Image (cartoon, rainbow, N blue to C red):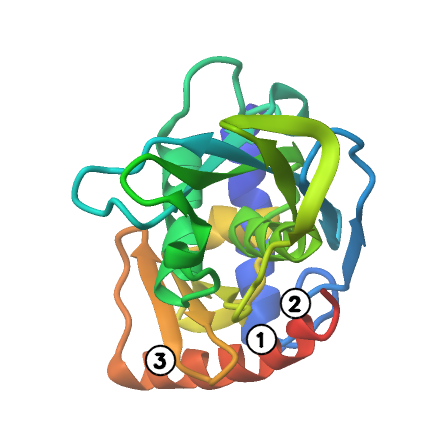
Amino acid sequence: MNKESAWELKTDSLISDLKNGKRADGRKVDESRKVAVSKGFAKYADGCAAVRLGETHVVCGVKLVPLPPYLDSPNMGTISVGAELLAMASPEFEAGPPNETSIELSRLVDRGIREGHALEFEELCIREGELVWTVFVDIYVLNDAGNLFDASSIAAMASLLDTRIPKLEGNKVVVGEYAGKLKVYSLPILSTFAKISNINVLDPVLLEEKAMSARFSVAINDDDKISAFQKGHGGSYSLKDINEMVDIALKNAKKTRKLI
């Protein structure tokens, strides 16, 4: 039996169980896996965090670099989010340049942070028109057991909370010395759903992702407002679906936020 046929057999069983109210790992459809967060383990990062979402494992590091500002925003710093799907994390990942999945992952995490106003970019200005802080957020996937989106979002926010602003002498960073903590003004939390046979499940594991016809991710801010959302795959959602998923995401964000 080839790999594709094996997946098809497993997904057929999964769909049958879901219709009977059972999920692959015993969770309810609106229940996420256990989240574990650790910070401060990378000596040379300005901030870092490791996140386990069930068996999905992601690490994130933050580095602040003084660079010239963009011409159209001379008094504002910026953020750059990148995601790398390491080959050891899944047999489906390959070494090389970013693919569509890693680009989508980094863009969605980036959008949640920006539109959620987690950072005030004017505060990252060092000298207007000359030098600002660029916040590099680098995400590395160590094990893909499903739902890289939420794990990466949590890791990025936890890393920003752990971040210190380097001390500057002139235009150069003083290695190992810091001027204070990076101010994080909000904690947008991403919640991702998979649609499987018209049933929407929160925080899908890998097998559930293989069976899904559509994916919906929504970032919820501290004030319960949506800061970003994105649909993936070819399936569709009704307005009722969207409203129900947003309600679940509101509760999930409050619970997750307490852990980071």
Front-most of residues 229 and 212 = 229
Callout 1 amino acid: Ala
Q: Amino acid at mark 2?
A: Arg
Quick one: quadrant of the N terminus?
top right
> For the residues carrying marks 1 and 2, which lies nearer the camera in this image?
1
Cα–Cα gap, marks 1 and 2: 21 Å
- For label 1, the residue is 253
- Nearest the viewer among 234 and 4 is 234
Spatial CA distance of label 3 from label 1 is: 18 Å
Q: Amino acid at mark 3?
A: Asp
Can see residue 200?
A: yes
Image point (67%, 71%), residue name:
256
Cα distance in 3D space between marks 3 and 2? 19 Å
Picture coordinates of residue 96, whole percent (x, y): 47, 13
- Numbered circle sitting on residue 90: none
Identify which residue is drawn at 80% across, 45% down: 40
Which of the two discs, 3 and 2, sits closer to the camera? 3
- Determine the residue positioned at 74% across, 29% down: 44
Residue count near mark 1 (Cα–Cα under 10 Å), binned few <14, some 14–19, many ≥20:
many
The residue tagged 3 is 241
Q: Which residue is mark 2?
A: 23
Q: Secondary structure at mark 2?
A: loop
Q: Residue furthest top?
A: 96
Q: Secondary structure at mark 3?
A: helix
Res 81 → quadrant: top left
The picture places residue 10, in percent across and down from the top left corner, at 60, 47
